[in-house]
Amino acid sequence: MSDQPQIVERLWHPPATLDSTAAQWLRAGSPTGVPARRAATVMLLRDGAAGIEVFMMRRVRTMAFAPSNWVFPGGGVDDRDAHTLPSWAGPSPQEWAERLGESVEVATSLVVAAAREVFEESGVLLASRGADAVVRPEDHPERDADRAALLSRELSFAQVLQARGMTLRTDLLQVQDHWVTPEFEPKRYDTWFFAALMPPGQDADDQTTESDLSDWIVPEALLADLAAGDAHMLPPTELQLERIRRAPDATAMLHRPSHLMTVLPVPEFDGDRVVLRTRYPL
């Protein structure tokens, strides 16, 4: 059997709010877009009564990027995400660099950003003390204060972990995908998608100002809402939900064989409409 991934080509329509922007960009000769900011996002997975569930957030309508869209916890890489961590478990920064095809510094910042963002936006902390189990809320009374210090940029994630004697558990993360925002968009991200099982004894919450709704989602239900026009999401989010829906359970999704390639949707005219031609590994 070949180890080469099956490459799928698919057409998506850009959001209605960006359709004219894409058309103008094409008519202008497809100029080079603004630089894409590195970002990381995490699919928190668990097994529920109706199958796999994933924790998602619906962004508030005032957000500059993807307003009212359903997303996974995540965001842009902070310069301080590359700070040296006091304790690191799992694949080494060099191993993560090899997995991601990035430099050690960039790979480190992406993995740290993934763990930091999921803590900031859901309260789930992928860290332990030494070789012990992942820290539970009752063993981390400073949890709310640490989260607030990160959100205010008073402290870096490395500083928070060092102050609490904690180890970053990168072994709990698995990289899944890599997408770059199309060049015509005014705000662009170079985003790595990670997955993690929901740690025992922790709860994901809705204590973030970036969303108006946060909840555990059954992919089938949200995809049905998308098809009916009752929900909005970007193509990579839709694709991840389709993959989760096909997986037999959360652990299988976490460890599914992934063939990483950089996916960059390319706009083109289809008659009078703009479509995004996208090639990605199945």
Image: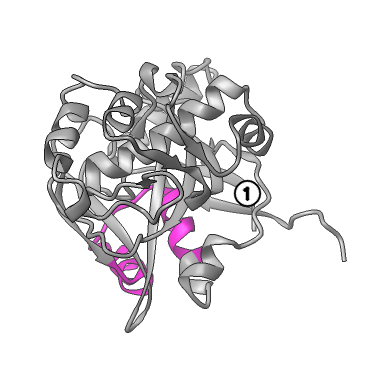
Residue 41, quarter of picture: top left
Residue 192 in view: yes
Where does label 1 land, which residue? 280
> Which residues are drawn in magenta?
217-243
Q: Check if residue 240 falls in the magenta segment.
A: yes
Instruction: Examine the rendered structure and indicate whether residue 87 appears above or below residue 7.
Output: above
Q: Give the residue at x 28% y 33%.
A: 65
Residue 222: image location, x then y, percent: 31, 67
Residue 161, above or below 41: above
Identify which residue is drawn at 52% across, 61% down: 254
Q: Position of residue 40 (x, y in %)?
A: 42, 37
Q: How is the image coloured?
A: one colour
**On the picture, is 260 further left or further right than 204?**
right
Let me know if residue 270 appears in the view: no
Pick the quarter of the image with the N terminus.
Answer: bottom right
Q: Is residue 192 magenta?
A: no
What is the crowding at mark 1: few (fewer than 14 residues within 10 Å), some, or many (at least 20)?
many
Q: Is residue 197 above or below residue 98?
A: below
Element at badge 1? Answer: strand
Residue occupying image coordinates x 44% and y 49%: 235
Residue 130 spot, x, y in % from top left: 42, 44
Q: Is residue 128 above or below residue 62?
A: below
Q: Position of residue 246 (x, y in %)?
A: 52, 73
Query: How many numbered discs, if any?
Result: 1
Looking at numbered disc 1 in the image, what kind of residue is underneath it? Tyr
Please name whichever residue, 167 or 223, is drawn nearer the observer in this view of the structure.
167
Residue shown at 53% from the left, 65% from the top: 253
Q: In the image shown, does 227 or 219 lie closer to the viewer?
A: 219
Determine the image quadrant of residue 198. bottom left
Q: Residue furthest right?
A: 1
Classify the position of the C terminus by image quarter.
bottom right
Q: Main secondary structure of the magenta part?
A: helix
